[in-house]
Protein backbone atom coordinates (compact mmCIF):
# COMPACT_ATOMS: atom_id res chain seq x y z
CA UNK A 1 0.00 0.00 0.00
CA UNK A 2 1.09 3.58 -0.52
CA UNK A 3 2.82 5.02 2.50
CA UNK A 4 0.28 7.05 4.50
CA UNK A 5 2.92 9.26 6.05
CA UNK A 6 4.52 10.68 2.91
CA UNK A 7 1.77 9.84 0.39
CA UNK A 8 4.23 7.75 -1.57
CA UNK A 9 6.86 10.43 -2.09
CA UNK A 10 9.42 8.78 0.19
CA UNK A 11 10.15 12.11 1.82
CA UNK A 12 8.50 14.20 4.43
CA UNK A 13 8.86 17.62 5.88
CA UNK A 14 10.04 17.88 9.44
CA UNK A 15 8.58 20.86 11.22
CA UNK A 16 9.28 21.21 14.89
CA UNK A 17 7.52 23.64 17.20
CA UNK A 18 10.77 25.17 18.39
CA UNK A 19 11.57 26.24 14.86
CA UNK A 20 13.30 24.83 11.88
CA UNK A 21 12.20 22.50 9.16
CA UNK A 22 13.90 20.06 6.88
CA UNK A 23 13.06 17.42 4.34
CA UNK A 24 14.03 13.98 5.43
CA UNK A 25 13.61 10.46 4.24
CA UNK A 26 10.24 9.22 5.30
CA UNK A 27 10.60 7.31 8.54
CA UNK A 28 7.68 5.02 7.87
CA UNK A 29 8.61 3.61 4.47
CA UNK A 30 12.36 4.37 4.53
CA UNK A 31 12.00 6.37 1.36
CA UNK A 32 10.37 3.66 -0.70
CA UNK A 33 6.90 5.20 -0.67
CA UNK A 34 5.41 1.81 0.03
CA UNK A 35 4.56 0.13 3.31
CA UNK A 36 3.13 -3.28 4.13
CA UNK A 37 -0.50 -3.58 5.05
CA UNK A 38 -1.28 -2.37 8.57
CA UNK A 39 1.03 0.57 7.87
CA UNK A 40 4.03 -1.26 9.16
CA UNK A 41 2.73 -1.08 12.70
CA UNK A 42 3.03 -4.80 13.18
CA UNK A 43 6.66 -4.79 12.13
CA UNK A 44 7.80 -2.72 15.08
CA UNK A 45 5.52 -3.85 17.81
CA UNK A 46 8.35 -5.19 19.93
CA UNK A 47 8.12 -4.39 23.57
CA UNK A 48 10.51 -1.83 24.93
CA UNK A 49 11.26 -0.87 28.52
CA UNK A 50 10.65 2.71 27.42
CA UNK A 51 6.98 1.86 27.16
CA UNK A 52 6.92 0.80 30.81
CA UNK A 53 8.42 4.00 32.20
CA UNK A 54 6.12 6.36 34.03
CA UNK A 55 6.20 9.43 31.79
CA UNK A 56 3.85 12.40 31.77
CA UNK A 57 3.42 14.00 28.36
CA UNK A 58 2.10 17.44 27.70
CA UNK A 59 0.07 18.47 24.71
CA UNK A 60 1.78 20.48 22.01
CA UNK A 61 0.25 22.52 19.22
CA UNK A 62 2.07 20.52 16.57
CA UNK A 63 -0.40 18.19 14.87
CA UNK A 64 2.46 15.98 13.69
CA UNK A 65 3.89 15.57 17.18
CA UNK A 66 1.04 16.24 19.57
CA UNK A 67 2.77 15.12 22.77
CA UNK A 68 6.14 15.80 24.32
CA UNK A 69 7.89 15.23 27.62
CA UNK A 70 11.24 15.87 29.23
CA UNK A 71 12.78 12.64 30.46
CA UNK A 72 16.25 12.60 32.02
CA UNK A 73 17.11 15.80 30.20
CA UNK A 74 16.05 14.45 26.82
CA UNK A 75 13.04 15.58 24.87
CA UNK A 76 10.59 12.86 24.01
CA UNK A 77 8.09 13.48 21.26
CA UNK A 78 5.23 11.36 20.12
CA UNK A 79 4.08 11.50 16.53
CA UNK A 80 0.91 9.89 15.29
CA UNK A 81 1.46 8.27 11.92
CA UNK A 82 -0.90 6.74 9.42
CA UNK A 83 -4.52 7.29 8.61
CA UNK A 84 -6.22 3.95 8.17
CA UNK A 85 -4.22 2.27 10.93
CA UNK A 86 -2.62 5.00 13.03
CA UNK A 87 0.34 4.19 15.18
CA UNK A 88 2.72 6.16 17.34
CA UNK A 89 6.36 7.00 16.85
CA UNK A 90 8.57 7.97 19.76
CA UNK A 91 11.39 10.40 19.06
CA UNK A 92 14.05 11.13 21.65
CA UNK A 93 15.94 14.32 20.84
CA UNK A 94 14.54 14.14 17.30
CA UNK A 95 15.79 10.60 16.70
CA UNK A 96 13.19 7.93 16.07
CA UNK A 97 13.59 5.18 18.60
CA UNK A 98 10.35 3.28 18.72
CA UNK A 99 7.05 2.63 17.01
CA UNK A 100 4.03 1.27 18.76
CA UNK A 101 0.31 1.15 18.23
CA UNK A 102 -1.49 1.40 21.56
CA UNK A 103 -0.73 4.18 24.03
CA UNK A 104 1.23 2.59 26.91
CA UNK A 105 -0.64 2.37 30.18
CA UNK A 106 2.41 3.67 32.06
CA UNK A 107 2.31 6.94 30.15
CA UNK A 108 0.11 9.85 31.15
CA UNK A 109 -1.20 12.60 28.93
CA UNK A 110 -1.67 15.78 30.86
ZN1 LIG B 1 6.69 7.17 3.52
Image (cartoon, helix red, strand yellow):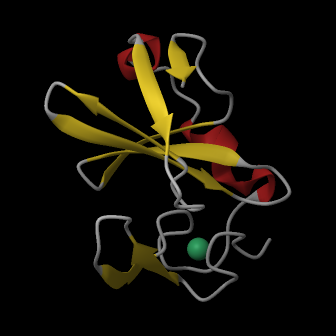
**Residue visible at 52% across and 10% down?**
106
Left or right position of 55 against 78 = left
Q: Look at the picture and state if 70 lies above or below 18.
A: above
Query: In this image, 45 relative to 39: left or right?
Result: left
Question: Does residue 69 lie above or below 3 as drawn?
Answer: above
The image shows residue 31 at horizontal and vertical percentages of: 49, 79
Q: Is residue 57 left or right of residue 72?
A: right
Ligand 1 is found in the corner quadrant, namely: bottom right
**Residue 19 as seen in the image, left or right of residue 10:** left
Q: Quadrant of residue 24?
A: bottom left
Residue in the image at 67% along x and 45% along y:
87
Is 109 placed above or below 85 here? above
- Residue 34 in the image, given as x and y percentages of width and height: 67, 74
**Which quadrant of the view contains residue 82?**
bottom right
For image coordinates 74% across by 49% down, the residue present is 86
Q: Choose between 2 and 109: the one closer to the eye.
A: 109
Amino acid sequence: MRCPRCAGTGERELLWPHGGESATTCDVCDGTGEVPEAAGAAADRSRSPLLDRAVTFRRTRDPDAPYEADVDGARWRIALVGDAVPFHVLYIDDVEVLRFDAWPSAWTRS
